[in-house]
Image (cartoon, rainbow, N blue to C red):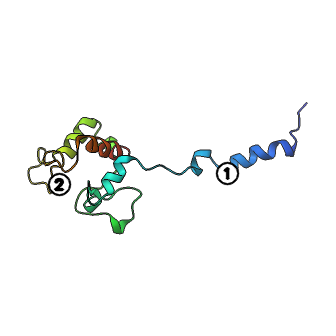
Amino acid sequence: MRKRVSLLLAAPLLGACLAGPVWAAEEKKEMPGQAIAFDNRKGNCLACHAMPGTKGEMAGSIAPPLIAMKLRYPDRAKLRAQVWDATVANAKTSMPPIGKHKILSEEEIDQVVDFIYTL
């Protein structure tokens, strides 16, 4: 014999299913590294790189887009080394040696790398 579920009892459950996951309604918090990367007085990554979640008109197009960074740099240390001084891997790069020239502090570089690694 089947039991019937009252529509009054099922309604909240149905409403939750239709509304989607709870986390979808939460606003994504900005990471400290994102603020540094987007700041034109600090990292200024948007001057050259496009990134997910940014408007096309505010992102640069002269450098590779920062997407799928965990796939491109499975070793986080190599990504950090690239941000610290890209001239090591490519002497003709237009990317400034951010760490070598002390454009950002070591802590700020770590925060930017943490952010970029999520893209």
Q: Tell me how far mark 2 sits from mark 1, CA to CA.
A: 44 Å
Q: Nearer the viewer, mark 2 or mark 1?
A: 2
* 56 left or right, relative to 99: right
Task: Looking at the picture, tell me which residue is in the foreground, 55 or 68.
Answer: 55
User: Given the image, on which type of amino acid does mark 2 rest?
Assistant: Met
Q: Horizontal and vertical percent for residue 63?
A: 23, 58
Q: Circle 2 sits in a helix, a strand or a loop, which is it?
A: loop
Label located before the other in sequence (2 or 1): 1
Residue beneath the point at 39% across and 55% down: 52
Residue drawn where x is 36% and y is 66% of the image: 56
Q: Label 1 is placed on what type of residue?
A: Ala
- Please rate how many residues cluster around mark 1, counting C-alpha atoms within 10 Å: few if below 14, some from 14 to 19, many from 20: few
Q: For residue 56, which numbered disc appears in the image?
A: none
Which residue position holds label 2?
Answer: 95
Which numbered circle lies on residue 19? 1
**Disc 2, disc 1: CB below 8 Å?**
no
The image position of residue 73, as x and y in percent, is 28, 40
**Crowding at label 2, few (<14), some or many (≥20) Cα neighbours within 10 Å?**
some
